[in-house]
Amino acid sequence: MEALLLTFGEAFDDVETYSGNRPSAAYLERLLSSDSFIAIAALQDSEVVGGIAAYELIKFEQERSEIYIYDLAVAATHRRQGIATALIQEVKKIAKVRGAYVIYVQADIDDEPAIALYTKLGVREEVLHFDIAVENGNGTA
């Protein structure tokens, strides 16, 4: 997980978020053993060159779930080699086993490579995303 966090930080040009206040080993162990978290790392010669972090959301309106891809990144030197697509294909296998009916992901409006990848793999929906701060939490309120 440490190497995956570093890969995300470098790929998103946001090392501070992914490395500045890293979770403890106990926290990561609890997260990785949870039924709702999915983490997959792409390795080349035992080096993490990409990865995906996703969450399974259990639905209430029907007996099914959906998978939310929270982070997906590939190191700059390994892009355009099908790694991101392969990572999503692995999540699709997990989603099928878990009975999920959909996988969804959001992309920043100006992230053209991500938009191209997700357009190739799925159907685009126009939605708005809102961050609601939590008082006394780790947010900004």
Image: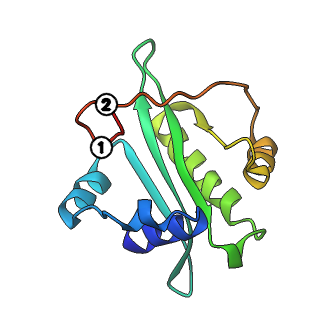
Neighbour class for label 2 at 10 Å: few (<14), some, many (≥20)? few
Residue 4 left/right relative to 107: left
In the image, is 31 to the left or to the right of 4?
A: left
x and y, in percent, of residue 79 in the image: 73, 70
Q: Nearer the viewer, residue 58 or 117?
A: 117
Question: Can you give x and y, in whole percent of width and height, for residue 102 in the image?
Answer: 59, 31
Q: Is residue 6 above or below residue 17?
A: below
Residue 138 falls in which quadrant of the image? top left
Q: Is residue 134 above or below residue 78?
A: above
Read off the residue under disc 1: 138
Q: Residue at x 60, y 67 (%)?
A: 11
Is 79 on the left-hand or right-hand side of 28? right
Identify residue for label 2. 134
The image shows residue 27 at horizontal and vertical percentages of 22, 57
- Secondary structure at badge 1 equals loop
Give the residue displayed 79% in from the left and 51% down from the top.
Answer: 112
